[in-house]
Image (cartoon, rainbow, N blue to C red):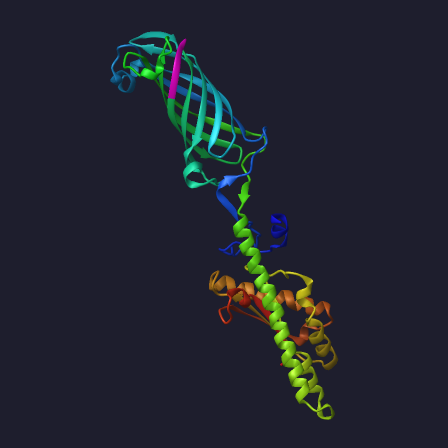
Amino acid sequence: MVALAVASMSVASYAQTETVEVVEVPTEKYSVQTNKFWNNWFISVGGDFMSTAPHGADWGDLFFNGDNGKFGFNVAVGKWFTPGLGLRLKFNGLDGAYEGEDFDLRAYRAEALFNLSNLFCGYSDTRVWNMSLIAGGGSIGGYNSMQLGLQSVWNLSKRWSIFAEGTMFFADRHGKLYEFKDSYNRFLDLSIGLTYNLGKTGFKKTPDVDAIMALNAAQLDALNASLADQQAENAQLKSELAKKPKEVVKVQEVYKATGAPQSVFFNIGSSKLVSKKEIVNLEAIANVAKENNVKVYVTGYADSATGSATYNQKLSEKRAETVAKELEKLGVSRDNMVIEGKGGVAALKPASYNRRVIVEIK
């Protein structure tokens, strides 16, 4: 049923972008569709600076003593399973230093990445900057380790991004990492580099069923309004014809009655016909115009409750032009048409009734 609702819609976004008319299916902010296993993999390469504070050293040695650190490199491969959760394996290849003594600080890390931007602000594939929390474990310099950190990512394109991160390691040969005593080795890893996204990237948002059904209901309202309008005009036409004696009916009166004003309704933000059924009632006006060589007035309107005045003026003109082209197909000469757009109006309720073109012979 959702697929039918989506297929039947031809609505534009609420903002009504003035450059291109698009169909935007409402989606949920925090929900996405499950991605395939080979989607959203990435590989990253960067440079490191590792600062060291071994057993018994002060915290100041870790943060403020440049003699206790060295530069190296890192490489990582991972996958985003959801916009908020990713996993990666990372290798740091570097030597450490403490008070002039060098030692091996190669690190093998398995880490979870929690994208805080997507978790708290909702998923967006156009967001330039993302912040993630890093948490994991592994081995560094032969020590068991646990690590916590933060990562900032700046997206350059769909494939490439720059990352900068800082990670604090807590390491101990005996594996009693949960105690977090000052006597354990501590390491501060600062890293910057590039990430390349492999295969298909991004996530498809989950359609918002409630919003879709609401929009579909608005379309049905517009169709019902069109039907009610046609029925009212037909009733008025029958009433006028019944009042006129057949022997005194003139040609001028015939085409005025037969060519009673007709309304063609449109979806929000659109100048495309909802269906060909909308123009069936134009045939009577087209026939009268051709037979009597009279003017047909095609006037477009938009809903003033949405969109800017400038955009609504353009939209009303586009709608009028759409109907004028259909009249041409029915044989009405463009020379016998007066085409204009009146912009946004709020003459009818609900607002959807104002999204229409009126065709009449005056």
Provide the residue span drawn in magenta: 142-147
Q: In which quarter of the image is residue 68?
A: top left
Q: Give coordinates of residue 109: x percent, y percent.
A: 45, 18
Q: Answer above or below: position of 126 versus 89.
A: below
- Residue 275 visible: yes
The residue located at (68%, 89%) in the rendering is 244
Quarter that holds the C terminus: bottom right
User: Can you say whether 202 is above or below 104 in the image?
Assistant: below
The residue that appears at 42% across and 18% down in the rendered structure is: 137
In the image, residue 248 lies at what x, y percent?
71, 93
Q: Is residue 134 magenta?
A: no
Residue 147 vertical placement versus 339 (above, below): above
Q: Quadrant of residue 187?
A: top left
Q: Is residue 270 visible?
A: no
Q: Nearer the viewer, residue 120 or 59?
A: 120
Q: Position of residue 301 (x, y in %)?
A: 55, 68
